[in-house]
C-alpha cells in the first residue's frame, strides 16, 4: 500500500511538472549535461582510459600462459634404419649361419674335432638362432618411437625483471591519459554550460523583447485610434494617419519576427536539454523586468586561470606523456631481462625411452636480450621523441599566452558591458520622460504626430538597448568565468 501511495505521488508530481514545464537556469544546465551525447561519449572515454591504466599496471606482474597441440603424422620417427632393423630381426639366423660355417671349416681341418663338436654346434644353431631372432625383434620393437600421434603442452610463467623502464613509463602514460580524458570531459562540460546559458538568456531576452514589441504595438494602435479621431475632426491630416499606420505595420512585423525568433530559440533550448522540440517551456527569469546581475568583479589571478583551465592541464599532461614516450623509445634499444619458468608435457614421452604416456618436466631460467647494432636507429628515434616533447612544451607556452589575452579581453568586455548598462538605463529614463512629454503634448495639440512617433521609436530603442545591455552583462560575466576556468 505504501509503495502504491509513493508511486501515485511520483506520477502526480511528474504530470504536474510536465504541465508547468517551468525551467530555471540550473535545471536547464542539469538537463543539458545529462542529455548531451558528447559528454556521454567523453564519460565512456574516461572509463576506457581507466581500464587501460589498470591493464598497463598488470605488466609489472608475472604472466602465465598455456599452450597445447596435437599432430598426426603419416610416418613415425625411426631411430634405426631399415637395414639395421633387418639385421636385428635376423640376428639368430646370422649367428646360425656363422656356426654352420665354423662347423664346416672345422670338419675340413680336423674331422675328429668336427665329429666331437658337431652336435654341440648343431644344438647351438637350433636353440640359439630362434632366441637371438626373438631378442633382435624385441630390441627393434623397443626402439620404435610411435610418433604418428603426438601430443604436447606447456605452461609458461614470465616475470619481467628489467625492461629499460618502458613498463613504468607506459603505466604513467596511461595514468596521464585517464587524467587527460577527465580534463577533456571538463572542457566539454564547460562548453555545454556556456551554450545552455547563451540560449537561456537569449530566450529571456527575446521574451522581454516580445513584451516590449507588444507594448510598442499597443502604443501605436492607441496613437492610430487618436489620429483617426483627429482626422475625423479635421485637426490632423491623412498623411499623419498614413505615417502612423505604416509604423503600426512595421511594429506588427517586428512582433512577428520576435515571436518566430523566440519559438526557434525555445526549440534550440529544448534540444540542448534533451526535451521534445514542441515542449511548451517557461523560463524562471522570463517575467523578471530587471535581470539580476552578478557583482561586477573583474579582478583575476592568471595562476588561478592556468590551474583551472582544462586546456592548460591537458597540454601539461600531453607534455608529460611525450616525456614518457622518450623513455619508452630509449628502452626499446636497452637490454631487457626476464625470469622464465616452464612445465612441459608430451605424449609420447622420452624420459623413460619412448612411452605413450603423458610425462613432463619443469625448467627455470632467465632470458637476456641485448641490442648490439642497429645503425643508430635508436638514437634517431630518441631525438625524434625529444623533438615531439619540445613541441608540446611550445604549445603549452603558446596556449598560456592566448589564454592570458582571452582573460584580459573577457575582463574588458565585462567592464564595457557594465558601462553600456549604465548608459542604457540613463537613456531609458530620458526616453520615458521624452515619451511622456510627447504624449501629453500630442493630447494638448501642441506636438505633431511625427514627433510622437519619433519619441515612441526612441523609447523602443532605449528599452531594447537596456535589455541587450542586461543580457550582455550576464553573458560577459559567464565568458569571464569560462576564460578563468571557474564556470561550474
Image (spheres, grey):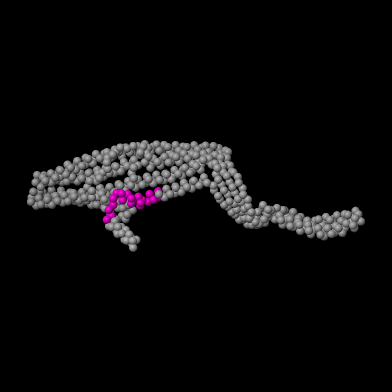
| Quarter-of-image position of residue 388 | top left
What's drawn in magenta, residue-wise?
20-42
Left or right of 307 on screen, residue 128: right
Left or right of 60 on screen, residue 212: left
Could you say which is closer to the camera, residue 339 or residue 264? 339
Residue 76 seen in this snapshot: no
Q: What quarter of the picture does the C terminus occupy?
A: top left
Residue 60 horizontal/vertical position (percent)? 52, 45
Residue at 18% from the left image edge and 49% from the top image edge: 216
Residue at 23% from the left image edge and 50% from the top image edge: 287
Q: Residue furthest front?
A: 2
Residue at 61% from the left image edge and 56% from the top image edge: 70
Instruction: Say above or below: 78 vs 297.
Output: below
Q: What quarter of the picture does the N terminus occupy?
A: bottom left
Residue 322 horizontal/vertical position (percent)? 46, 40
Q: Is residue 253 magenta?
A: no
Residue 302 horizontal/vertical position (percent)? 35, 37
* Magenta span main SS: helix
Residue at 38% from the left image edge and 49% from the top image edge: 39
Residue 419 seen in this snapshot: yes
Instruction: Say above or below: 458 vs 16.
Output: above
Residue 116 horizontal/vertical position (percent)? 90, 57
Left or right of 172 on screen, residue 24: left
Amino acid at each position: 500500500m505504501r509503495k502504491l501511495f509513493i508511486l501515485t505521488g511520483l506520477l502526480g508530481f511528474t504530470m504536474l511538472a510536465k504541465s508547468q514545464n517551468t525551467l530555471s537556469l540550473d535545471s536547464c544546465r542539469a538537463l543539458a549535461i545529462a542529455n548531451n551525447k558528447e559528454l556521454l561519449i567523453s564519460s565512456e572515454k574516461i572509463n576506457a582510459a581507466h581500464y587501460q591504466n589498470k591493464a598497463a599496471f598488470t605488466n609489472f606482474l608475472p604472466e602465465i600462459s598455456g599452450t597445447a597441440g596435437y599432430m598426426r603424422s603419416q610416418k613415425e620417427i625411426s631411430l634405426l634404419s631399415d637395414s639395421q632393423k633387418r639385421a636385428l630381426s635376423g640376428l639368430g639366423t646370422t649367428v646360425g649361419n656363422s656356426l654352420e660355417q665354423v662347423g664346416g671349416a672345422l670338419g675340413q681341418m680336423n674331422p675328429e674335432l668336427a665329429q666331437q663338436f658337431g652336435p654341440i654346434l648343431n644344438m647351438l644353431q637350433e636353440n640359439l638362432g630362434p632366441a637371438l631372432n626373438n631378442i633382435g625383434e624385441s630390441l627393434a620393437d623397443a626402439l620404435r618411437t610411435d610418433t604418428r600421434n603426438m601430443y604436447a603442452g606447456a605452461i609458461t610463467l614470465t616475470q619481467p625483471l628489467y625492461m629499460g623502464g618502458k613498463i613504468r613509463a607506459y603505466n604513467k602514460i596511461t595514468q596521464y591519459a585517464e587524467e587527460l580524458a577527465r580534463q577533456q570531459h571538463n572542457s566539454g562540460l564547460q562548453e555545454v554550460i556556456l551554450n545552455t546559458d547563451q540560449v537561456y538568456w537569449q530566450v529571456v531576452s527575446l521574451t522581454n523583447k516580445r513584451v516590449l514589441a507588444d507594448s510598442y504595438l499597443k502604443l501605436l494602435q492607441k496613437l492610430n485610434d487618436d489620429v483617426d479621431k483627429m482626422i475625423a475632426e479635421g485637426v490632423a491630416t491623412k498623411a499623419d494617419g498614413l505615417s502612423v499606420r505604416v509604423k503600426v505595420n512595421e511594429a506588427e512585423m517586428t512582433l512577428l519576427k520576435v515571436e518566430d525568433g523566440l519559438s526557434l530559440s525555445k526549440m534550440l533550448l529544448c534540444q540542448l536539454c534533451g526535451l521534445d522540440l514542441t515542449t511548451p517551456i517557461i523560463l524562471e527569469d522570463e517575467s523578471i523586468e530587471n535581470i539580476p546581475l552578478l557583482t561586477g568583479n573583474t579582478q583575476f589571478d592568471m595562476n588561478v586561470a592556468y590551474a583551472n583551465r582544462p586546456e592548460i592541464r591537458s597540454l601539461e599532461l600531453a607534455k608529460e606523456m611525450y616525456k614518457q614516450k622518450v623513455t619508452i623509445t630509449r628502452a626499446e634499444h636497452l637490454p631487457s631481462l626476464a625470469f622464465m619458468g616452464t612445465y612441459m608435457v608430451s605424449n609420447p614421452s622420452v624420459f623413460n625411452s619412448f612411452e605413450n604416456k603423458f610425462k613432463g618436466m619443469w625448467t627455470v631460467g632467465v632470458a637476456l636480450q641485448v641490442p648490439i647494432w642497429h645503425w643508430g636507429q635508436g638514437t634517431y628515434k630518441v631525438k625524434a621523441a625529444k623533438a615531439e616533447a619540445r613541441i608540446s612544451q611550445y604549445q603549452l607556452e603558446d596556449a598560456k599566452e592566448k589564454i592570458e589575452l582571452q582573460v584580459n579581453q573577457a575582463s574588458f568586455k565585462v567592464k564595457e558591458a557594465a558601462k553600456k548598462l549604465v548608459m542604457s538605463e540613463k537613456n531609458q529614463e530620458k526616453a520615458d520622460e521624452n515619451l511622456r512629454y510627447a504624449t501629453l503634448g500630442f493630447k494638448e495639440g501642441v506636438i505633431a504626430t511625427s514627433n510622437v512617433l519619433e519619441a515612441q521609436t526612441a523609447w523602443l530603442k532605449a528599452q531594447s538597448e537596456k535589455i541587450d545591455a542586461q543580457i550582455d552583462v550576464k553573458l560577459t560575466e559567464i565568458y569571464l568565468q569560462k576564460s578563468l576556468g571557474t564556470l561550474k
